[in-house]
Amino acid sequence: MNRPSVPVGSPAPGALNSPAPGTVDSPAPRTVHSPVPGAVDSPPSGAWEELVTAALLGTDRRRPPGCAPGQEAPKALLDVAAVETVRRRAGLRPARAVRRSQPAPEDPRPALPPAAARRLAMLLADRPGAAGGGRRGTAPDLMELLPQWLATANDRGFAPPPQSLPALLDAARGRTDLRPAALTFAGPRAVWLARLNPDWRFALRAAPGGGAALPHPEDSVGIQQLWQEGLFAERVGLLSAIRAREPAAARELLTATWATERAEDRLMFLDSLRTGLGPQDEPFLEQALADRSRNVRATAAELLSALPGSALAARMAVRAGACVALDHTLQTPAISVEAPHECDAGMERDGVVAKAPAGRGERSWWFGQLVEAAPLRTWPGRLGGRTPRQIVALPVTDDWQGELHAAWCRAAVRQRDGEWARALLGSPSAPEAGGPGAVSLAERAKLLGTLGSAERAEWVAGFIAAHGLSEAFQLLGVCAVPWSGPLGRAVVDALNIARDAGSYPWSFSGVMGLAERCLDPAEASRLDGLQAVPDESEDASPGAGGYWAEAFQRLVTTLRLRAAMTEELGT
């Protein structure tokens, strides 16, 4: 019996799929008609898209190509697709063999203890539940413990089990806060895997030079070649690596090509100078103040203002000092403020942004920028030899206190000045510390970041003891983990007071979540008495006692799990 002729044509992988990438189509074949009754004609070249469209829309809406009159359309579609598939496959040409990928690099770190490896698999297998009105139950949230587990594993120098790397990278893909610790733990194999899976490209962006091997520090020729010819990510990685090791060499490398760099690249390169910033960087940054890019000028000015001995800081001190003075005409000495009336070209060159944000007065906007950029050591001499604490205690005329103190807060954070930070923070038990006051809670949290961990914890513990937990969440977020004993006890005591008051624990769910991750696991034994359902008073919210019991049970379970995790990772 005669069969339909099948012309030899161009390559393709399979039925109803698009051609494989990299294949080469051959010239359109001659169509041969079959004498067999009911057989379909071989479709003309280029009909594959029509077949796919007919299959998607349905043969009742789109007649397939090559379907003879009176023939059943669905059957004809399958017949034509079969003929076309054979035709396309018949001309498949062998492709060039793919080069075998390089093996994964070795990881010299010691392997995880078996118990810790099993724990890692459990943490990575956990998935957060659906969002709702507060988490219920007593089971720990394992995904929230993963960052702490990774920090401990990195601190002890362990390498991950190879089979855990895909799940680890998937977890880091979904949580940007997890990426630094996860990529450190994953080690060199994270970059190797990221080159094979586009879902993990973030690992290439996070790796120095986009995961490329950087030249040896003594290979001056290789360094120059990579700096001149490398991709942007490679050049950023190279500059950052050299800056961390030898700041002057990185600055010289950047100076050589600065004039030819794009504005957005100059901004990124300039940002790398934050590492190891010192007086020797001032001449280069002064030149950058004349840059044609506003963002580059602003960044250069910010870096110079962080150097109290720079010429820009001196210019800002003169400008800010002209705006602030002691008013001796009053019965009690006070600070008077006369904000600038214009933003001249010199101010703009030194980083002052002329246009104020919507809803903000221009003069107060300019004034805040001048005070923020002025060295804090300017003010004792300007204000009668007073200490920072005495200066902050002075009244400020004409409602300028909030603007002046906010600018001093930003200056203390930028210049990492602990004495001014303590003065602006004040006593944690003072009524104004709980707000509203001249210094907001957000500003206090930033000021706390300039102090040592022990001093931070002590101040926040005093704040909680005086003002409770309702405003403490932001402040707790800057405290070192695990919380110190006094801070942990202050948090637990405040939670116990809220529990006895009969309020719902949902108002404290954020603090409770922080306690699960940050409270010292040794405190678990102190919480045993809080796991029972308390007696509810008449004015208590209905059912609040049961919710509190669950919350404390979850807290105790989580603390004991954290203790077990630490023990599994060894000492």
Image (cartoon, rainbow, N blue to C red):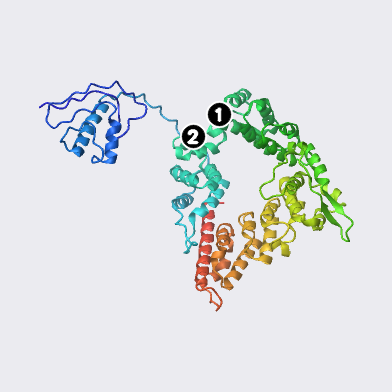
Is 371 in front, or is 428? 371
Q: How many tags in the picture?
A: 2
For the N terminus, give its image quadrant. Answer: top left
For label 2, the SS is: loop
Look at 85% across and 48% down and name the residue there: 382
Q: Is residue 221 visible?
A: yes
For label 1, the SS is: loop
* Residue 314, percent from left and from top: 81, 40
Residue identified by numbered label 1: 231
- Tell me the amino acid under the disc marked 2: Pro
Which circle marks residue 367 in the picture?
A: none
Q: Nearer the viewer, mark 2 or mark 1?
A: 1
Above or below — where is 18 with respect to 534?
A: above
Write down the quadrant of residue 72 in the picture. Answer: top left
Look at 79% across and 56% down and name the residue there: 398
Q: How busy is the neighbourhood of tag 2: few (under 14 within 10 Å), some, or many (20 plus)?
A: few
Residue identified by numbered label 2: 105
- Tell me the amino acid under the disc marked 1: Leu
Is 181 in front, or is 177? 177
Is 118 in front, or is 77? 77
In the displayed image of the protein, which residue is found farthest to the bottom? Answer: 538
Q: Is residue 275 visible?
A: no
Q: How busy is the neighbourhood of tag 1: few (under 14 within 10 Å), some, or many (20 plus)?
A: some
Residue 15 falls left or right of residue 544: left
Look at 43% across and 51% down and name the residue there: 125
How many angstroms separate mark 2 from mark 1 (CA)?
23 Å
Disc 2, disc 1: CB below 8 Å?
Answer: no
Above or below — where is 242 with respect to 25?
A: below
Q: Give the mark, 2 or 1, whose residue is nearer the N terminus.
A: 2
Residue 543 falls left or right of residue 511: left
